Every structure is written in C-alpha cells, then in structure tokens.
Amino acid sequence: MCGIIAYSGKGDAAILAFESLKKLEYRGYDSWGVAALLANGKKAFSVIKKVGKIGATNSEFVKQAIPEQNHMAIAHTRWATHGGVTEQNAHPHLDCRLTIAVVHNGIIENYQGIRNSLNTPGEAHEFKSQTDTEVIPHYIEHLMQKEGCDFLTAARKAAILIKGRSAFVALNSETGQMFAARKGAPLIVGIHENNSEEFFIASDLTAFLDHTNKVMYLDDNEGLSISNGKIDFFDIETGAPKQKRVVDIHWHGKANLEKEGYDHFLIKEIMEQKYTIAAAINQDDEKIQDVADAIKGAFGTFLVGCGTAGKVCMTGEYLFSKIAKKHVNSVVASEFSGYQHYLTPKTLVVAVSQSGETADVLEAIEIAKSKSAKIVSLLNVFGSTMMRVSDDFFITNAGAERAVVSTKATTAQLAVLSLLAYAAAGRLQEGKLLLMNAASSVNDMLNPRYEEHLKRLALILQDKKDIFIIGRGLNYPIALEAAIKLQETCNIHAQGFAGGELKHGPLALVGPDTPCIVLVANDDAKQDILNNASEVKARGGFIIGISPENDEVFDFWVKVPDAGNASPIVNIIPVQILAYNIALLLGRDPDYPRNLAKSVTVK
Ligand code: G6P
C-alpha cells in the first residue's frame, strides 16, 4: 500500500523517479508526487503533487514542471490511510523550512502524540496535511534545530520513534543526503550495473528492473544513507554498520512488466494462464514431497492468506481433505491471532501470498514464529519479505502480476497446493499429470471464441445489481473467489455461497431474473449443486452454469474442461474473463479498481 521510489545518481532524477513510480501504481493510485533536489548549488526542492493516477500523466509534464538539472529525487504513489485524497495529503511532505522532504509507506501509530509534542509554546510547526507521515520531516527538523543533531542522526532518531509497520525515505536539500529506513514495510535497493554510485530505493524491485537487476534487501530495523554518491547501511537502533550482499535477480522477465499489446494488464494476465499453470507445477519434486510430509506430520497445519489467497487457502483445506485425507485449517490472516493458543513448535503454517508483503500475513507469521512454529510460504514474488522470514518457500512462477485483481497468481497457487495435497497422499506423479492436463485444457480454453461467448454473458449481466455464485466442496471457496472478482472489477454486488446454504436465508433475496452462477464439477457434489440451481430457478432465478456438461437447469452454459480435482482452476477462469468484460461495458478501469490496492501493507 503506497509505493515509494527514490533515485540518486547522475541521471535525470525526477524523470527516472517518475517513470519508476508508474511501475508501483498498483500499490495505490489516489494521488502521487515527486520532490527533486535541484543541482548547481541551489539547495532547494522542486515539488509536484497531483490527485489521481500517475498512469494518466506523461514524463513531458514532469520535464516542464521540473526543467532544472537534478540528481536526487523521491516519489510516491498513495493509497490514503490518514486524511482524504487531496493534493495537500499527497506525498512528499516537507518540514517548515522546506529543506527535508519525506515519502512514506505504512502507518505511524503514534503520530498524534508526536504531532502534539511538536506543538509546544516554545516551538510551533505548521502542518499542512492530515497525514501521519508529515510528523517525520517536522520531527527531523525539530531535532536538527533544537537539539543540534545532524540530518542523518535526526532521521535515524525519527525512524526509532515511529511505531507501526512502515518504511520511509527522507531527502535533505541542504546537505544533499538521503536517508531510508525499513520498519516492517518493504524497501529494496537497486545499484546500477555499470555505475556503483547510482541507486534506486523502492517498495518493490519491479520499479527499477528496467535499469538494473542488482539488488540489496533491507531487513526490518535497518536503514541506509547516501552521501556524495556513497551508500552505507546500518542498524536503526544502534547505528552500527551493516554489510549487504548484492543479489542478481534474473527470475523476473522484464517483458512481463508491460502490457504487450493488450489493452489492460488484467486480460493479459488472464491469458497468460495458458502457460503459468504449467510453470507453477514445475517445482522440485523432492521439496514438494518434504513439505507434504511435514504437513502430514505437523501437529496442526494452518493455511493462511488474505483476499484471493485466503480463498485459495480455503480450497486447500478441501484439497487436503479430499485427496490426502488430512485435516488442515485455513484461516484468514487477519483472524489468525485468535488461533495462537493452538500453536506449538510442532505446528506448521503455510502462508499463501502473491506479493509476499501483505501485512496481515506477515503478522500471522510473526505470531507463529513467536510460538516456534515452522513457516512455509507459497509466494509469487522472489525476494519478498515473506520469503525471507519463512523456513522454506515455493515460488509460484506466475511472473509479475500487475493488475490489482489477482488471476494468474491464484491459479498458480491452487496448482501448487494441489501438488502438495497429492504428494501428502503419496500420489505426487498422479497429481502432476492431472495438473498438466488441466494446464493444457486451459490453453485450449483461452481462445477468442471462448471470450466472445463470455462477452455475450457480460451483456446480459452488465446492468444487474446483484449476482449470486454457488458451489459445493472444492468449488465452494471458488464461489467466494468468483464473487471477489465481480465485486472489485465491476463494482457489482456479488456474493458467493455454499450451495446448501441458500435455503437458510439467501434464497429470500432471489426474485425474477436474479442471476446465479453455478460452479459445477464432475464430482460427488454435482447432483446436489444442480438441485440447488433448480431451487433458485424455481424462484425465478437466471441460472448460469459453469460446468463440463450442459444441463436443462442452465439458462446460459459456459463449458469448462472436465478437470477432476483441478476443477477449481478451470472454473474460476471464465469468471475472470466475464468480470473483465463487464468492467469494460461499465467503463470501469479493470486494472485499478476503486478504493483498492494490490499490495496491502497496512493491517
Ligand atoms: C489485495 C489484492 C488481492 C490479494 C490480497 C492478498 O487485496 O487486491 O488481489 O488477494 O491483497 O494479497 P497477497 O499479495 O498476500 O496475495
């Protein structure tokens, strides 16, 4: 949530920071801003702040707004937490003297106390925003003016003082120094391949992969400073120097970060499922077997995730039950603390996360670690925080997912969890074969004719106020996931239910033409879910069957391959395409749903 980028080097800093910031737009898109440190001895900032998406602006605008030479800049794209979406609340924030500029990601829990402490009879600071962030530049200013601290010491003291998960970068126009601190929110440094004095600092390495793939990861409670082109790392609390290893990142195809001819990232990423499912199951068999054995042997396994990944965890619970006859628990990460009483050193937590940065999942991991439980993660982003704090991890190999709405990462996570369930049953090769067949069926499915069919359905559903989705067994969590897709992409009220639950309440909402999507698989729940569809139809509902075979209860049939236990993977794909096409008809931005962000780094 919120994206930070900072640049220091010989390049055109404002433009480089601005272009890199565009790659972080998925982290928040309420407003954005840049502060560039002017060169030629000016010792002053040029600042731009705008409400709206950065993607809507081109670099010509920045060139005109900051025509002067500058070699250091910080920039930020915002997802509002404290204070509305206004230019004043957009970052960077500055101190009273306009010599310290700060960009920040996360939450400062004790900001109110800091703000109060800065407004005493002997000292008044003029706050221009309602943000928590603004206390940082003012506190640094206070320490420099009143306590005689140098900039780097003052910034480090500010980093120590603030509470809550966050990361920030501060730039001083008088000394030309940059300071960055990581306290629970990601911060990654890129060093230019041919120039050891050129640095990027960002919330996510995708921001600077066009320029370098040599990176250094800050750990929690670590900071860095850049002075005269030299970078130093240190412990925030003690100031003691830290050595950092430079890592070469090659997993992330650069081309994967662009739309490649598609109108939106969302449809591009849906189409990439032609090959990402096969890539996801390309795992080390031995490691899959080891982790599956650990799940079997654990005294309690918890699958933990948020949002879509949470629905994947829930599907995992069914997969393990059905395939491996093993009970595992799925828990929404934000509720995990309620389960801490059951954790022991023999517990295994499997964290599922596309980004590897979601605050609630990180917190669940911290709780589990405090009880000495083991952590295995299923992640899409190599080098993410979760990867670094887990005992073991799998990368789901879906490649960079840029649309806020998760698609290819979801099916990749489902594929890896299915593999683990088969391995836990001692049937890994059978599971691999099943998933390979599902991957090739998805390849056949994702053709223009299929999309045309779903476009016809989009026309029927575009003006509906409510859409129900029902499923049973493996497809119950997928009904919940399908609802999320329609909610966020189309802003339609969509709700998923277990097929058997309708008659306990929700059926009262069904009237003439209420659309109900029915997820069917050729499994032992098939007849029951078709019966539930009939119950909806008998009350006037319009039944959309996503099913390998047609049935007389369907008013509209969307064919999916008969994928056996991989039915969750094939059944969600038509809903993804449907949601995309309804969004287009309604004029929504499929890549950037209102009010949301992709990487949720606040609790
Ligand atoms: C956000 C995204 C969702 C995602 C969830 C968890 O809400 O919009 O698509 O499922 O975060 O993210 P994670 O990176 O942990 O999978």
Image (cartoon, rainbow, N blue to C red):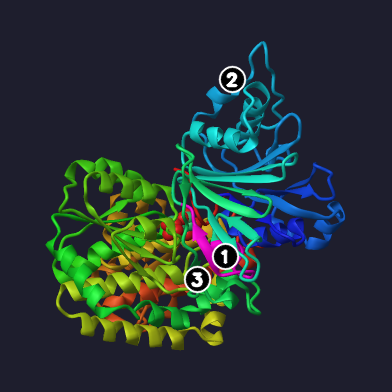
Q: Which residues lie in the magenta part? A: 205-218
Whether residue 540 is visible, yes or no, is no
Q: Which amino acid, by three-letter code, is at mark 2?
A: Asn
| Near-viewer residue (317 or 138) | 138
Q: Tell me the residue that label 3 is attached to.
A: 249
- Residue 146, image x, y percentages: 65, 21
Write down which quadrant ligand 1 falls in.
bottom left
Residue 463 in magenta?
Answer: no
Residue 451, horizontal then vertical, whole percent? 54, 80
Label 2, on which residue?
116
Secondary structure type for disc 3: loop
Examine the structure image and report whether residue 215 is included in the region drawn in magenta. yes
Mark 3 nearby-residue class (10 Å; few <14, some 14–19, many ≥20): some
Cβ of mark 2 under 8 A from ligand 1:
no
- Relative to 495, residue 603 above or below: above
Q: Is residue 479 above or below residue 304?
A: below
Residue placed under numbered mark 1 in the picture: 206
Q: Is residue 310 left or right of residue 330?
A: right
Q: Given the image, on which type of amino acid does mark 3 rest?
A: Ile
